[in-house]
Image (cartoon, helix red, strand yellow):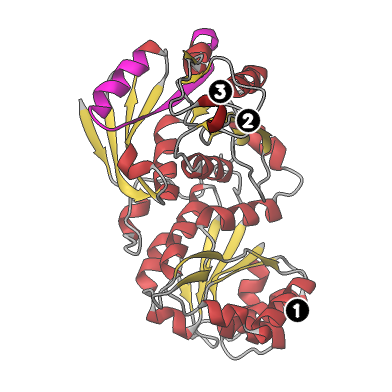
Amino acid sequence: MKCRANIARKMRPKARQDVSNEPLNAAKGPLFGKNVLVGLTGSIACCKTCELIRTLIKNGANVKTVVSPAALEFIGEKTLETLSNSLVYSDTFSKSRSTEHIHLTDWADIFVIAPITANTISKFAAGIADNLITSTFNAYLGLKKPVVIAPAMNTGMLNNPFVQNNIIKLQNEGVKIVKTETGPLACGTVGNGRMANVVKIYQTIFETLCPAGVSDINRAKGKILLTMGGTREPIDPVRFISNASSGRMGLCLADCAHSMGYDVEIISTIKIENRPYKTTIVNSTLDMLEAVEKSFSEADYLIMAAAVADYRVKNPLPHKLSKKNEGETLTLELVQNPDILKNMGQIKKENQKTIGFSLGTENIIETAKAKLQAKNADFIIANEAKVALNTDENEVWIIDKSGKSVHIEKNSKENVAKAILEQVL
């Protein structure tokens, strides 16, 4: 039995469809009752703000949007109005109220400008109030209320010393900056300047609004133990057997789960920076098994996103191999590694779920279904090596115990992670 789950393509927000089946301001959301004012300025990254608004509302926030005149060149008012379930504010002197910026300042618990251009950053830093979004910022910062900005611009503009100085000025006044990322830019070049992904922006909002209650909120939703990266099986002190896993899918799952309000713990073969999660770094499959066994009893979910080696060298050498000593051929004896997912599936309690990944090159769904039964897992995520490895995108099939298969079409790993978690949690 198969069904298909579609997720919105990048750069093509379908506003009304995105929220039609989701309740607004759900009482269980970690941001329930919080008023978030989202500002948009003139950047192609406005399309990503649609997903931010959707995430905020899904997590319980009330959202209003305010736009600069240039922002409306990149996104329509109807899209923002539909997503936020609220009017879009664009005129400083509206027919209904002559002090719109003061009204918005009083209403909002946090002001988030994403994307923000070099032009608006410079206006903010200089105290210029020439449109509704800059006037609102002036009033808002004057009351010492929290502000978060997510810049988006060409690399050259970002590196301009005047722009950098203005960013520093805003930081010194308490404005939180969600740093730009490196990747393809709208101008056709590749470099630093892309607006941060929605998960990072949401995390900053969440941690700003709920600094003391983050742990309690996370515990209320449950704990996720997640493994990521490719294990390394030593041959000698400098060589090892590994695979091409980048760990990106696992990190996207962790970020998304955290943004949904879960307590996340990571066991990884890759060093992770600038994340709020408890993290244990391991190398081999045996190391990972030991770390998982230590934390599994406290977890509600185990997500095995790591690419775990099936075999390891039976007797790793204590010294570096030398071709001079070994000759033209080298034989390594390999032994099978323990199956971490299977081991945890055998000891899990009724309130625990285990979720594994199955990476293959052929017959991927049939292979995943066989693994589901053999490992006593609740879900297996099937994906193809040529699509998943060392890319920013993925395509998966989520298979549950009944044999039902849900297809998540090829999309960014951030979006695929979100779709996976919506199915398995």
Using residue 407 as the reference point, say whether residue 99 is left or right of it.
Answer: right
Question: Which residue extends farthest left?
Answer: 1
* Residue 226 location (% of width, % of height): 56, 31
Residue corresponding to mark 2? 320
Which residue sits at x=52%, y=18%? 340
Q: In the rendered structure, which disc, 3 or 2, sits on the residue that comes first in sequence?
A: 3
Q: Relative to the observer, which residue lies in front, 52 or 103?
A: 52
Task: Select label 2 or label 1 by which is in front.
Answer: 2
In this picture, is 80 found above or below 7?
A: below
* Residue 199 location (% of width, % of height): 54, 52
In magenta, the rendered stretch is 346-373
Residue corresponding to mark 1? 169
Q: Quadrant of residue 416?
A: top left
Task: Select label 3 or label 1 by which is in front.
Answer: 3
Q: Relative to the observer, which residue lies in front, 254 or 174?
A: 254
Task: Select label 3 or label 2 by which is in front.
Answer: 2
Mark 2 residue type: Lys
Which residue sits at x=63%, y=56%? 205
Residues packed near mark 1 inside 10 Å, few (<14), some (14 to 19) or many (20 plus): some
Mark 1 residue type: Lys
Using residue 143 as the reference point, say whether residue 129 is left or right of it.
Answer: left
Residue 357 is one of the magenta-drawn residues: yes
Residue corresponding to mark 3? 285
* Residue 151 location (% of width, % of height): 57, 72
